[in-house]
């Protein structure tokens, strides 16, 4: 127990145990590199961590509870607040789960637009990851550069849906809008410049001595550990497991585009950093292809953006305004909500952070009976329990950084 | 007479359902239609009782006895190569059947297949922890306990994970209201100021849309503003609305309602 006096003030965040020289410190929940509201209770021997207890729940908003009290379309904006760095990917995960539950086929143009949004979100998320992790480790310049590029992407997204952070840009059954006229042009302009930007970051970081010291052989996740903790996304691929849901269980048009899945055997922070960089290049590759696919849909005059399923999806605006029955359907769908069939689905998608799954149990009512969101960051936070012991205090920051956890998603 | 509100499920209900409406079902196909799933199911069936099994939306669902959950997971992991437990949680069926439905979502990367194992347990029954097989069960089971109160045996660190340790009730139960229960409305008062301050502070307002025009501490009424905390009088004279400084600000002169010209003739 501490005995405070004038020379030794009371440290409310630290407790000393004189007996075996063990110190217990609180890391967070307000630590700037805790990426939100993570509290770690760390047991230390000197500088080395012997035990770590991640404590979460500081951002818990009860989304699963809210989902049980909302009609399906009403819940869509709430999913934005999960992984708020890449909110379209959450919108999409939820929309896809409901579509699979209903058994809807989304029009091709909507699929292409969704893929564009998803990949733009992936780029935004990875750039944000790079910026914040580099800042945590002390590379201020990279932070500024990466945020600049992210800003361009947010502008592009803003052109599409009007929002920069919480997009709600996907609807159950398709997308609400066609892309604006300048969208392809702006995106192309950005993508043409992007490889040079990536090279700039890599020039700053790849062989940077401090960066390498903080990243190489730090936070090594073994294959067994990654599997056992249910890791996904980059956390999994950095440990040598080649598993990308876009490739293995393709959704949308990912089976039509050509892209590689970067994998590393090392499992350390540096491997994860390299994978994020490589994934950004792959995303850019996919975006180029989606632009061509979009042009083809224009040539083929495939204009539908929402699936045609009057029982579940409102008719296009023009029908609602001109046809009586469409208006009635729309009114019922907005006030009472759609009623998906009785059944259960679990639909995983590859969000920028990893496997984002939505489990929906529907009892045929307009409110889901149970909705469970499988957020990748939840398990990537859990793994800190096993990952941190043995490493040093400064490594905590870089390990939290490369796990790429977002607390909107961990606590939901 | 007041409308009867069921107490065992206080979640939002549809206000209108057509009396002839029959809910359609998501199609289920027999497990035999998929070879990989069929062999996995055979491996489970060889040792344990399978209550129900089917394929729904490309995933196999197997209902087993709750006592077998650990052993079945072991078979899935060791014999069938399901290397990840991607999700585990429960569904509250207490109102309908008095049971919880615990589900485990497994993934096999070598087969590219996903399986959901389910078991039904009674209210006070516990399930065995899968933590020795899959570390991901550690947090998933803690969340399951925290949210629904499903107890797990032999868990290394059974503690609430999202809610505070001294929280009363389990939020995802159907009996738990969306706005929180009685204990929730006193939680912060008790924690910060102590129980003795309850009379002074009052319960927390957990209704996000509440507006109380008589509460002059937190709300004001446009045109009828009173000072903070002052008593609200019903017959209070209306104050004219003004959004600008008296003399106007730089380059903008103050709008004077009396000087304004009201156009009555639209063809003027």
Image (tube, coloured by chain):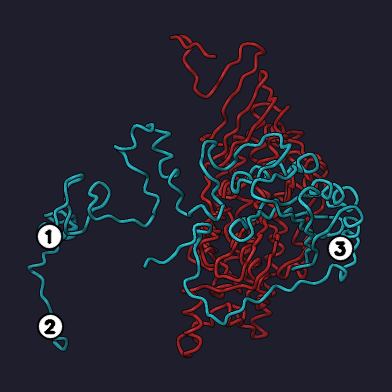
Quarter of the figure that contains the N terminus of chain A? top right
- Subunit that carries the residue with mark 3: B
Marks 1 and 2 share the same chain: yes
Tell me the residue that label 1 is attached to: B238
Q: Which residue: 33% across, 34% down?
A: B197
- Subunit that carries the residue with mark 1: B
Q: Position of residue B29 (x, y in %)?
A: 80, 72
- Subunit that carries the residue with mark 2: B
Label of residue A272 in the image = none
Whichever of callouts 1 and 2 sits on the residue coming sooner in the sequence is 1
Instruction: Specify few, some or many for label 1: CA neighbours under 10 Å numbering under 14, 14-19, or 20 or more.
Output: few
Q: Position of residue B143 (x, y in %)?
A: 63, 45
Q: Position of residue B150 (x, y in %)?
A: 65, 46
Instruction: Specify few, some or many for label 2: CA neighbours under 10 Å numbering under 14, 14-19, or 20 or more.
Output: few
Cβ–Cβ under 8 Å for marks 1 and 2 = no
Tell me the residue that label 2 is attached to: B264
**Is residue B207 found left or right of A244 in the rendered image?**
left
Q: What color was chain A assigned in the picture?
A: red
Q: Secondary structure at mark 3?
A: helix
Q: Which residue: 79% across, 39% down?
A: B132
- Determine the image quadrant of residue A386: top right
Using the rendered image of the protein, determine whether residue B222 is visible from the camera's viewpoint.
yes
Instruction: Specify few, some or many for label 3: CA neighbours under 10 Å numbering under 14, 14-19, or 20 or more.
Output: many
Label of residue B37 in the image = 3
**Is residue A196 found left or right of A162 in the rendered image?**
right
């Amino acid at each position: 127990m501490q005995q405070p006096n004038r020379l030794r003030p009371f440290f409310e965040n630290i407790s000393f145990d004189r007996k075996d020289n063990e110190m217990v410190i609180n890391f967070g929940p307000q630590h700037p590199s805790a990426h939100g509201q993570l509290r770690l209770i760390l047991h230390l021997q000197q500088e080395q961590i012997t035990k770590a207890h991640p404590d979460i729940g500081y951002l818990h908003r009860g989304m699963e509870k809210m989902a049980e009290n909302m009609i399906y379309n009403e819940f869509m904006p709430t999913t934005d607040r999960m992984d708020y760095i890449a909110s379209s990917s959450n919108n999409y995960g939820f929309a896809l789960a409901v579509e699979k539950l209903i058994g809807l086929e989304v029009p091709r143009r909507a699929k292409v637009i969704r893929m564009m949004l998803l990949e733009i979100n992936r780029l935004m998320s990875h750039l944000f990851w790079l910026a914040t992790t580099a800042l945590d480790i002390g590379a201020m310049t990279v932070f500024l550069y990466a945020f600049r590029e992210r800003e361009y992407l947010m502008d592009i997204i803003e052109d599409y849906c009007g929002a920069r952070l919480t997009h709600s840009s996907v609807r159950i059954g398709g997308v609400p809008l066609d892309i604006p006229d300048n969208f392809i042009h702006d995106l192309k302009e950005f993508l043409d410049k992007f490889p040079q930007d990536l090279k700039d970051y890599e020039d700053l970081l790849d062989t940077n001595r401090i960066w390498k010291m903080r990243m190489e052989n730090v936070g090594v996740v073994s294959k067994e550990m990654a599997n056992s903790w249910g890791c996904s996304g980059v956390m999994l691929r950095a440990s040598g497991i080649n598993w990308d849901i876009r490739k293995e269980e393709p959704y949308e048009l990912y089976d039509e585009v050509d892209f590689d899945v970067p994998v590393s055997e090392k499992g350390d922070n540096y491997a994860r950093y390299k994978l994020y960089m490589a994934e950004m290049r792959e995303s850019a590759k996919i975006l180029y292809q989606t632009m061509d696919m979009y042009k083809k849909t224009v040539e083929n005059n495939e204009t539908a953006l929402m699936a045609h399923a009057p029982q579940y999806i409102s008719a296009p605006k023009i029908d609602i305004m001109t046809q009586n029955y469409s208006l009635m359907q729309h009114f019922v769908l907005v006030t009472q909500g759609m009623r998906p069939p009785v059944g259960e689905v679990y639909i995983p998608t590859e969000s920028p952070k990893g496997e984002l799954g939505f489990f929906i149990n529907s009892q045929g009512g307009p409110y889901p009976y149970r909705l469970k969101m499988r957020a990748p960051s939840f398990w990537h936070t859990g793994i800190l329990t096993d990952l941190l012991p043995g490493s040093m205090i400064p490594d905590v920051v870089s390990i939290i950084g490369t796990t790429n956890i977002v607390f909107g998603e961990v606590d939901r | 007479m007041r409308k009867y509100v069921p107490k065992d499920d206080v979640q939002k209900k549809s206000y209108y359902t057509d009396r002839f409406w029959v809910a359609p079902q998501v199609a289920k196909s027999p497990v035999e239609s998929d070879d990989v799933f069929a062999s996995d199911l055979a491996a489970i069936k060889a040792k344990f009782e399978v209550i129900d099994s089917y394929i729904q939306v490309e995933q196999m669902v197997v209902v087993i006895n709750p006592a077998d959950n650990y052993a079945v997971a072991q078979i899935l992991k060791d014999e069938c190569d399901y290397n990840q437990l991607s999700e585990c949680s429960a569904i509250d069926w207490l109102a309908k059947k008095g049971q919880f439905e615990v589900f485990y979502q497994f993934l096999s990367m070598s087969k590219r297949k996903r399986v959901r194992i389910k078991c039904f347990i009674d209210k006070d029954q516990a399930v065995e922890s899968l933590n020795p097989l899959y570390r991901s069960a550690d947090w998933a089971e803690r969340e399951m306990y925290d949210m629904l109160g499903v107890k797990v045996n032999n868990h290394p660190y059974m503690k609430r994970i999202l809610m505070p340790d001294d929280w009363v009730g389990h939020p995802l139960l159907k009996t738990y209201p969306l706005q929180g229960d009685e204990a929730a409305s006193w939680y912060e008062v008790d924690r910060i100021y102590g129980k003795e301050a309850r009379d002074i502070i009052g319960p927390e307002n957990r209704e996000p849309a509440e507006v109380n025009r008589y509460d002059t501490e937190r709300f004001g009424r446009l045109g009828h503003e009173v000072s903070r905390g002052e008593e609200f009088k019903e017959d209070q004279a209306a104050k004219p609305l003004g959004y600008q400084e008296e003399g106007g600000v730089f380059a903008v002169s103050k709008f004077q309602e009396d000087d304004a010209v009201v156009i009555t003739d639209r063809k003027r």
